[in-house]
């Protein structure tokens, strides 16, 4: 019985997620759902990416947290449009659902944006089970978390198209076996694109930014194709 209920909730979320994605498409904005453990560096990664791309692209952020606006306050220093979702009042869910993302997105001037980062609640488990309505899922895994995480939390790495290995600047002190980590990720999802970065220093961001720019372009082209067909 419980399984049936869960299925029902998930499929209701899937239906909303499609309308959330349509909202992003209508506005030609590319939406990235950024997932990862608490402390993996999601917020720092968003800050660094915006710092680099800010002059050429309009970026907005939807911040998901159970409580607090701490991350949103950090991001707001960059003077970009930002919306906060706190799941605390809805029972403290440890993930974001598509309906909340849509509501948050509607508070932003979407037509003026090229890119939206949705920072999911820090958690390697259930954010992977709920489609947020974003175009792509990206998982941030930081070196201190170890090599085994793709094997232990496979769904997260299967639902993601990109894995960002973050905190590369700590490699020397941590002695993490990156080759082993890459093998584990490949075992779980051979199609995963992997970028090794340091959000603290900006190292490795060229390939990550290239990926974002390519995907933003696809989103705009897709929209113009739809236009020309009708
Ligand atoms: Mg954060
Ligand atoms: Zn959850």
Image: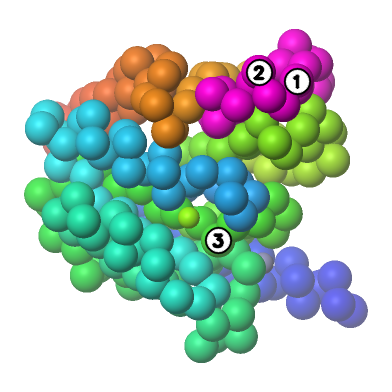
Magenta run includes residue 71: no
Magenta run includes residue 164: yes
Q: Is residue 222 visible?
A: no
Q: What span is in magenta?
A: 163-187
In the rendered image, which residue does mark 2 sit on?
Answer: 172
Q: In front: 9, or 111?
A: 111
Please tell me whether residue 90 is drawn above or below residue 55 in the rendered image. below
Instruction: Indicate the secondary structure of the residue bearing disc 3.
Output: loop
Please tell me whether residue 206 is drawn above or below residue 228 in the rendered image. above
Badge 3 residue CB within 8 Å of ligand 2: yes
In the rendered image, which residue does mark 1 sit on?
Answer: 175
Cα distance between the residues tagged 1 and 2: 6 Å
Q: Percent position (x, y) of residue 166?
A: 55, 31
Q: Residues within 10 Å of mark 1 (few under 14, many from 20)?
A: few
Q: Residues within 10 Å of mark 3 (few under 14, many from 20)?
A: many
Left or right? Give the position of 184 relative to 205.
Answer: right
Instruction: Indicate the secondary structure of the residue bearing disc 2.
Output: helix
Residue sitting at 22 percent across and 70 percent down?
Answer: 107
Instruction: Indicate the secondary structure of the residue bearing disc 1.
Output: loop
In the rendered image, which residue does mark 3 sit on?
Answer: 121
Residue sitting at 66 percent across and 72 percent down?
Answer: 9
Q: Percent position (x, y) of residue 20?
A: 37, 59
């Amino acid at each position: 019985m419980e399984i049936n209920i869960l299925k029902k909730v998930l499929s209701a979320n899937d239906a909303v997620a499609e309308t959330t994605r349509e909202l992003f498409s209508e506005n030609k904005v590319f939406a990235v759902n950024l997932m990862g453990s608490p402390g993996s560096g999601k917020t720092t990664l968003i800050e660094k990416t915006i710092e680099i791309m800010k002059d050429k692209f309009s970026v907005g952020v939807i911040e998901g947290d159970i409580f607090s606006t701490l991350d949103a306050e950090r991001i707001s220093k960059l003077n970009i449009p930002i919306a906060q979702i706190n799941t605390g009042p809805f029972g403290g869910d440890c993930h974001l659902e598509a309906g909340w993302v849509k509501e948050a997105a509607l508070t932003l001037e979407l037509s003026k944006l090229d890119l939206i980062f949705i920072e999911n609640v820090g958690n390697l488990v259930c954010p992977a089970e709920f489609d947020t309505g974003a175009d792509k899922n990206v998982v941030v895994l930081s070196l201190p978390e170890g090599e085994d995480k793709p094997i232990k939390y496979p769904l997260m790495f299967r639902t993601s198209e990109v894995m960002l290995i973050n905190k590369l600047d700590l490699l020397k002190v941590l002695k993490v076996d990156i080759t082993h980590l890459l093998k584990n990720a490949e075992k779980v999802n051979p199609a995963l694109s992997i970028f090794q970065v340091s959000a603290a220093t900006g190292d490795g961001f060229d390939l990550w930014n290239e990926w974002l720019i390519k995907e933003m372009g696809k989103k705009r082209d897709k929209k113009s194709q739809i236009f020309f067909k009708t």
